[in-house]
Amino acid sequence: MKSLYTGVKEFFWPGDPAVRLRRLELTFWAFVLALAYLPIYLGFLAWIALVRPLDIISRQSGKNVFKTAYFYSFMANLFHLYWVAVVTPPGMVAAIFILSLYPAIVLTAFVRLYNFKKWFGLAMLPFLWVGMEYFRSLTEFSFPWTDLSYSQGYYLTFMQIVSAIGCYGLSLILVWLNILAWQAWDRRNVPELRIKAGSILLALVVGVYLYGWVVFPPYPIPGKINVGLLQGNVDLESKWDEASRNWNLDLYDSLSQDAVKDSGVDLLIWPETAAPCYPRVEKKYRAILSDIAAKSKTNHLVGALDIVYSPHNTKTYNSAFQFDSAGEMQEIYHKNKLVPFSEHVPYQDNLKFLTRDFLEKYLDIIKTQEVQWWSDFYPGDSIVIFNLNENKYAVLICYESAFPDYVRKTIMDGAEFLVNITNDTWFGRSSGPFQHLRLAVFRAVENRIWLARCANSGISAFIDPYGREFESTGLYERKVVRAGIYPLDEYTIFTRIGPIAGKISAWLLAFTLVILTGLWTSKKLRRR
């Protein structure tokens, strides 16, 4: 135990003053990068925030390369994802330790290539980085929240290019901007190279902005599909309290009546798990939901839970249910992409030692102290397209909006507009709800599709195909908002071809890691 403590202390506060100074500077630049994601229009910081970290890490040798890269990655994730502790402190610790491995491995591979041939390392870095971002969206450990492109979420003109190249293509551009800024700043380079790098950087920024300026249309005219968002703002403590369940449903009944009293609405959307029940198996609450839909005479999309009983393994799902205007329960969607170490343990059937039921046997703190542990939901296994009169839509529950290829597949399966339901109350008044909203903005722009987003405590909003928000709500207010939206009329380049930039980069990353691992293994064997 003492050696573990010593190792952690040495990691964060090493004995060597020079190393401490280096760690402090890396911490500063990790904080600068995190600032780029905040809702204060500092996205331009992501154009230069990697310059000094790349310069510092590239000067290391041996094991110090990975140690330095991991420290920087750890601090960057800590500043960016600190708010996960509001949801689950153990989950935040587990997530940051695991997520920090990805950039650390990529930066270590970059330094190996950079030391071999400087120009080769610089040319490969954007693909290694984006390959890491794409790989981070795969498997049940996926958490692609921190992709570099999302730092540009408040620069709508600059981000319009994602309709062609996707968010991974924009990340490629941002890494290139940092490399060019590094070469323009590095005094070891000859003046001609520094001027050339600076000129290309400026031309690249101007070119991306000009593209966005050209394609940006006038403000859209409201569409023909009338949608209402019901932001109930129900606190977490009372939602699942048995005594409050009926009150919670009465609240949404009242909001529904307010939404339809002045004009017709085609669809009313409830937030994620807004109905504190299991509608498919709890007949009492299914009848209440049916009655609410029938009284309002319109379709309702209700966020709730579902459970499938099995003799061997009962499974609980985070779900969305559609009730038609007659009160009939129709399609049910089970959330496919679950938040690791928050909603579930990745591969929980194989890693049972991390499930809540197992840990409760050995960790009394889970029961005796108010520590929010992760849930044990199961992921769904299919996309569901909901029918709404003559139109179709897909539902993204919570952070499913972080997966560009998954969202694209729902559109290729027939979705004509998107609905994102979420409960961001867990995040408090942190940057989490604002970052989460930016993910939805990216998905709308990539596919030029309308998106209706309903959150329990905010931020609820309608997002047009160019990322503009309208009829939005604030945090922690009870409100009903309505708007008319259009169905999808044509596919974008991104929708047609998918995340090509991410896939190509992932293959290049895999090839590079295989080659470097092979060379390292061969070197070790020769020494023996």
Image (cartoon, rainbow, N blue to C red):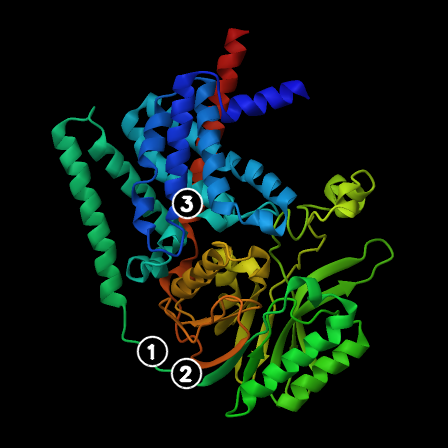
Q: Looking at the picture, how far across and down is residue 476, in whole percent? A: 53, 67
Foreground tag (1 vs 3): 3
Query: Residue placed at 55% from the left, 74% from the top?
Result: 478
Residue 13: image tag: none
**Of the image marks 1 and 3, the number of the one nearer the N terminus:** 3
92, above or below 221, in the image: above
Q: Looking at the picture, how far across and down is residue 225, in whole percent? A: 47, 83
The secondary structure type at the circle numbered 3 is helix
Query: Residue placed at 24% from the left, 60% from the top?
Result: 211
Q: Amino acid at mark 3?
A: Ala
- Residue where numbered disc 2 is placed: 223
- Residue where numbered disc 1 is placed: 220
In the shown orientation, is residue 379 left or right of residue 282? left
Query: Residue placed at 38% from the left, 35% from the top?
Result: 28
In the shown orientation, is residue 290 left or right of residue 469? right
Disc 2 vs disc 1: Cβ atoms closer than 8 Å? yes
User: What count of labels does the image hold?
Assistant: 3
Nearer to me, 253 or 334? 253
Question: Which residue is the extreme one toward the top?
Answer: 528
Q: Amino acid at mark 1?
A: Pro
**Rendered-image quadrant of the C terminus:** top right
Nearer to me, 443 or 367? 367
In the shown orientation, is residue 500 left or right of residue 411? left
**Of the image marks 3 and 2, the number of the one nearer the N terminus:** 3
